[in-house]
Image: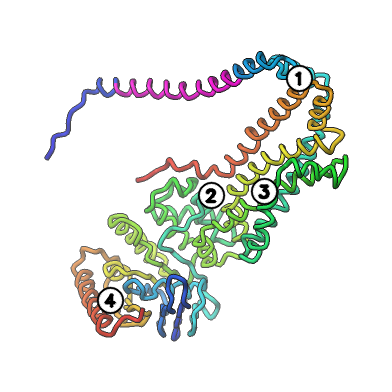
Amino acid sequence: MATVLIDNLTKIFPPTATHPSQVQALGGVNISVTGNVLVAILGPSGSGKTTLLNIVAGVEEPTSGTVRAVQDSVPAQISYVFQEPRLLPWRTVVDNMLYVQDRKSDRSRREAEFYLSMVGLSEVGDLYPSQLSAGMQQRVGIARAFLVNPDVLLMDEPFSHLDALTGRSLREYVQRIWLQTRKTALLVTHDVNEAVELADRIVLLRPGGVIYDDIPVDLPRPRFPDNPAVRDVQADVLRRFDSMGAAVQFGGARR
Amino acid sequence: MSAVPSVAPDAISQLSAQELRRSVWRRWGLRSTVVIGWVVFVGVWYLFSSFLGQALLPPLHTVVNRAWELITEGGFGSNLISSVTRLVGGFLLALVAGTGVGLLIAYNDWWRNLLQGPLQLIISLPTISLAVMTLILFGISPLGPVLMTMLVAIPYITMNVAQGITGVDRKLIVMSEAFGRTRRQIVKDILVPSSILSTLGGARLAFAVAWRMELLAEVFASSQGIGFQIRRSFESYDTQAMLAWTVLFVAVMLLFENFVLRRIDRWAGRWRMQDWGANP
């Protein structure tokens, strides 16, 4: 069983030419995620969501605090779905997927094709990314993330660059694959509807990277946006989100 | 609700036929301009030849005949091999050295500041001065042309390698790190393919500069090769042979540029041409 332990995590970016003063992206974040759950980190722009995910992925160093991602006491295999697909333009779709795998065999190729079919792209394996639409490219990014059979799956606003319809259909794909694989997952988003549809728990982050609220989402799956129960929870989270906005306003944003 | 104007199927097919005809004419029009360009070039040659006289500028057909004689009985093959060997030697050395220096420049600003000045200096050096320096430093030997060819080609390769690497999409590197790819994998699968097109562009440019330098260095500091033959023809006032050697060498270089370098370039960038695809 995978566990992600985020302990008193702080990230302060030093002053730059564009930001003359230092910027606090995360201010002592504590999150513990255990088991096959999908946790959404919900917050407005500047709340340090992506920074948090980058630190968990190990591509950014924290200023202080620790992150541990383990699977049965050994470091967990982490996988990442980015805001944009980040595919290598000179490789075909299947080769892009195989790039993130350590072993390259006929079997891994078949696995890549299997995950492509899971996102409805069984016919595009030999095409180049430039031959695909933005939505199709993002689906490849999602399939790639599942291909490595991760212990922990990180998703950084994976639908934010897509139009509403494509984003909605992609959410359905993610939900379907996640239900089949049940990976420990962290989803960063600023979309309340998306968080409620996908997550078992929503952590509200306010600007400056401080946790404001931690909301369990106890709804049956699969969830659909038109479902009244889903809409009720969305309304509740939105109320809390708005009150956080007020708290931020009255308390003063840190950046 | 606005009504959709109805168009008879016949009108559509008539329109398509017109479009098709227009597109064929346009294509042939473009192709014919290439022919017109060559016809104008040949015409201007004959015009100047008639003004200047055969001794100064022989008519084109006599130059072509002489070139054919050189190929069949005048030692064109051995001289070409001599020139091309030195050119390829210098060019390959430049490719290795230029790539190394380019990597250093891309690595950090310290190297960039250190090397940018000397490279700009080399680019600005007149090739004629370099050719004379070749003679002074190395005398009549094959080494001089090789080293000078390398020297003039290096800056073009260096600049393009550095540009290719600094232009790599950082997000792809972050993606690779997030998926636990090693530094070696990142170099092999991200940095090299990202910079290969820019490097090849630089290599083509360097090659074009290199063969001119090679020819010039041979004119001054060699006892064989096409450059040397051009000098010999010049010394014996044989303009026809001089032009024939030049035409032959230029033809070989253009063939190499079009049928080898350009094809490699197209092969390396084949993924860029695949943008006509699906968009459901």
Q: Tell me, yes or no, whether the highlighted magenta stretch contains residue B16.
A: yes
**Badge 4 amino acid:** Asp
Q: Are marks 2 and 1 on the same chain?
A: no
- Give the camera-side residue of B42 and A248: B42
Can you identify the residue that label 2 sits on? A90
Q: Mark 3 or mark 1, which has the lower sequence index?
A: 3
**Circle 4 sits in a helix, a strand or a loop, which is it?**
loop
- Give the camera-side residue of A192 and B149: B149
User: Measured from the top left, where is residue A3 in percent x and y?
Assistant: 46, 79
**Badge 2 amino acid:** Trp
- Give the camera-side residue of B51 and A99: B51
Can you identify the residue that label 4 sits on? A218
**Circle 2 sits in a helix, a strand or a loop, which is it?**
loop
Among the 4 quarters of the image, the one containing residue B134: top right
Q: What stretch of residues is rendered in magenta?
A: B15-41
**Circle 1 sits in a helix, a strand or a loop, which is it?**
helix
The residue sitting at 25% across, 78% down in the picture is A245
Left or right side of B255 for A43:
left
Q: CA distance from mark 2 to mark 1?
A: 49 Å
Q: Mark 2 or mark 4, which has the lower sequence index?
A: 2
Q: CA distance from mark 3 to mark 4?
A: 69 Å
The chain letter under disc 2 is A
Q: Which label lies toward us, 2 or 4?
A: 2
**Badge 1 amino acid:** Gln
Can you identify the residue that label 3 sits on? B123
Q: Which label lies toward us, 2 or 3?
A: 3
Q: Is residue A1 visible?
A: no
Left or right side of B69 for A240:
left
Q: Are marks 3 and 4 on the same chain?
A: no
